[in-house]
Amino acid sequence: MKAQFHALALAIAVAGFPAWAQTTPSGDQQFIAKASQGEWRASKLVGVAIYGPDNQSIGKVSDVILDGSGSAKAVVVGVGGFLGVGQKDVALPFTEVKWSDEPIVEPTPAPATAVQPAAPGMGNSSSMASTRPAASQSGSNLPASSAVAPPRTAIYDYPDHGTVSLTKDQLKAAPDFHYASGKS
């Protein structure tokens, strides 16, 4: 009997207040159905490599600090140490990091020159070396200095890396970052 009474009271309440019965959001609420290209997941920024002005690795993002409005305020970068031991966290303003979707290309060393043996009967020319790059000898038409990273063909929810104007030594000398709670 009690269950029937509660069911009846609920039915009357729902009938009397149509807004309660709606399962779709009202017109004043906004939902986002899908992220747009160029919008990143903060959780995926953690671990993204940070490079200095000389394209040398400085560290990795260890955290992202947001303000009360949801805007990214700072990037916490772990610098120094080995395998996380001895690492310190330094916070930089989020706007100081230049984010890139394209990978950094490490310079490739110049190919070694191949020594061409002298043809029989050619006299004393056995000490002459060919100066052609190995790539040309194998039939490739690409010069060795044209190393290009493959483009990122897929759309990612995070950038490939970030670049800052500070060197690794400058970040190591910067003050340690501490959370407001004092916890790590």
Image (cartoon, rainbow, N blue to C red):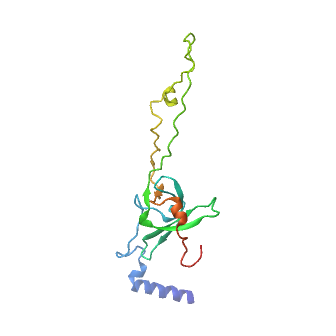
Q: Residue furthest left?
A: 27
Q: Residue furthest front?
A: 124
Name the quadrant of the C terminus: bottom right
User: Which residue is at the front of the view, 10 or 167?
Assistant: 167
One can see residue 147 in this view: yes
The image position of residue 125, as x and y in percent, is 55, 17
Q: Residue at x 44, y 46 (%)?
A: 151
Q: Residue at x 49, y 65 (%)?
A: 42
The image position of residue 121, as x and y in percent, is 56, 9
The image position of residue 3, as x and y in percent, is 56, 86
Q: Residue at x 50, y 30 (%)?
A: 133
Name the quadrant of the N terminus: bottom right
The image position of residue 49, as x and y in percent, is 52, 57
One can see residue 1 in this view: no
Question: How many callouts does the rendering have?
Answer: 0
Residue 109, above or below 99: above
Residue 169, above or below 6: above
User: Which residue is at the front of the view, 63 or 26?
Assistant: 63
User: Which residue is at the front of the view, 123 or 43?
Assistant: 123
Residue 3, above or below 141: below
User: Which residue is at the front of the view, 5 or 47?
Assistant: 47
